Image (tube, rainbow, N blue to C red):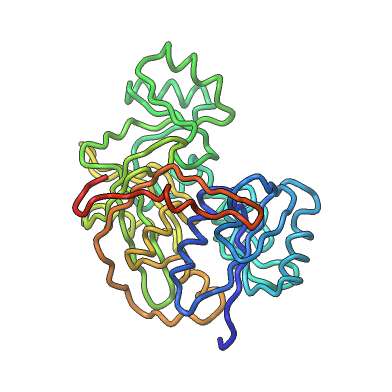
């Protein structure tokens, strides 16, 4: 491709959209990044070259508006960065690579993949045929739930079937607490408690016809269930487990796999059929799964084998931008300062 590649990133008002934009800022050659969001009350436009407002993914005109915007902007691809948009756009071509009506590719897993692996219960059922997963049950089925408790007892974990980022997850210690909590869940799934004695990990996996590669960050969670602190890990058990999952479900492009390692060994928490909010940190370490997925979809991926990654640590912090009439930008005096050798 001779011309500069241009990409439209959705939901740039949130952390994932901004992580995708920052990951692509490290691409070479440089790309033109456009962003959109259903709100203008955020600093997302500071991360892209041009910003557009679009309706929510649930709007009946969403796809047509996004398609028309993509054509008018002349973008080469669209990267959805919110789960409602991923669900909406992946369904445009359920069994194949998602694509807008204008034939502009959407960088996401296909609808069938998202439908299965974006649902924790279906994901566990599918994977249980291929890898060792922690015991689980449908929390909405009283008989399954009672059988699970009799067999595995407490503590157990209850979570929504369709949520991510460690949101709506509760550790339950007894039946009384379970009875109180379960009514607050729309579609609960229960899972045996997996301890994190040896760590909780966010594993990125990229797969193309030429190669497959995984990178793991051992992480600590912060507000909203996001990775707040993370450091690159070479744990062979974690990487092998994630690669086994990726090969079993035959991914193409990138997925994010969350696991814990403890007394039961490595066990799956969930699969996120999307990029991770750690995408920028991974790209800085050399694992450029956003860029590779984009190039794979455009038919110009030049990377043919796993790439070297460098050790790195990631620390998220609260930051602010100011707009005095010329767009949002950082205030120099507010930039964080750390002494050489200091640790987060």
How many numbered circles does the render carry? 0
Give the answer, above or below, for where 190 lies relative to 30: above
For residue 221, what is the image quadrant? top left
Residue 96 visible, this orientation: no
* Left or right of residue 220, residue 181 in this image: right
Residue 68 at x, y = what percent? Answer: 78, 66
Q: Measuring 28% from the left and 67% from the top, which residue is drawn there?
A: 309
* Side of 76 relative to 128 (left or right): right
**Image quarter in which the N terminus is found:** bottom right
> Is any atom of residue 67 visible in this view?
yes
- Residue at the image point whose x is 32% and y is 73% from the top: 306
> Of residues 299 and 266, which is closer to you in this image?
299
Please name the residue shown 26% across and 65% down the image: 310
The x, y position of residue 185, in whole percent, is: 55, 26
* In this rendering, position of residue 88 left or right of residue 4: right
Residue farthest top in this picture: 176
Q: Nearer the viewer, residue 153 or 31?
A: 31
Q: Is residue 97 above or below residue 248?
A: below
Q: Position of residue 52 (x, y in %)?
A: 70, 58
Percent of width and height locating residue 29:
48, 80
Rendered image quadrant of residue 169: top left
Location of residue 230 with respect to 6 vertically, above or below: above
Q: Is residue 200 above or below residue 289?
A: above
The C terminus sits in image quarter: top left
């Amino acid at each position: 491709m001779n011309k500069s590649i241009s990409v439209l990133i959705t939901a740039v008002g949130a952390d994932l959209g901004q992580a995708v934009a920052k990951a692509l800022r490290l691409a070479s050659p440089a790309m033109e990044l456009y962003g959109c969001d259903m709100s203008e009350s955020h600093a997302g436009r500071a991360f892209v070259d041009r910003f557009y407002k679009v309706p929510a993914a649930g709007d009946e005109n969403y796809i047509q508006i996004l398609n028309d915007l993509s054509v008018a902007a002349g973008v080469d691809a669209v990267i959805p960065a919110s789960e409602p948009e991923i669900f909406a756009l992946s369904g445009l071509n359920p069994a194949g690579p998602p694509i807008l009506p204008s034939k502009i590719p959407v960088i996401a897993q296909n609808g069938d993949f998202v439908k299965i692996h974006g649902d924790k219960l279906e994901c566990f059922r599918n994977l249980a045929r291929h890898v060792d997963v922690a015991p689980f049950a449908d929390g909405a089925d009283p008989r399954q739930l009672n059988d699970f408790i009799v067999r595995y007892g407490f503590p157990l974990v209850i979570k929504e079937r369709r949520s991510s980022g460690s949101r709506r997850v509760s550790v339950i210690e007894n039946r009384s607490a379970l009875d109180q909590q379960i009514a607050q869940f729309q579609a609960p799934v229960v899972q045996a408690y997996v301890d994190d004695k040896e760590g909780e990990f966010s594993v990125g996996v990229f797969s193309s016809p030429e190669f497959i590669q995984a990178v793991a960050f051992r992480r600590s969670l912060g507000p909203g269930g996001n990775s707040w602190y993370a450091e690159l890990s070479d744990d062979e058990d974690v990487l092998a487990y994630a690669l086994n999952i990726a090969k079993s479900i035959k991914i193409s492009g990138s997925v994010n796999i969350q696991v814990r390692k403890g007394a039961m060994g490595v066990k799956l928490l969930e699969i996120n059929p999307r990029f991770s909010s750690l995408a920028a940190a991974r790209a800085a370490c050399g694992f450029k799964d956003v860029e590779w997925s984009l190039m794979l979809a455009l038919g110009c991926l030049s990377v043919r084998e796993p790439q070297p990654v460098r050790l790195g640590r990631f620390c998220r912090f609260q930051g602010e931008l100011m707009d005095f009439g010329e767009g949002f930008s950082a205030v120099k005096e507010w930039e964080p300062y750390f002494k050489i050798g200091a640790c987060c």
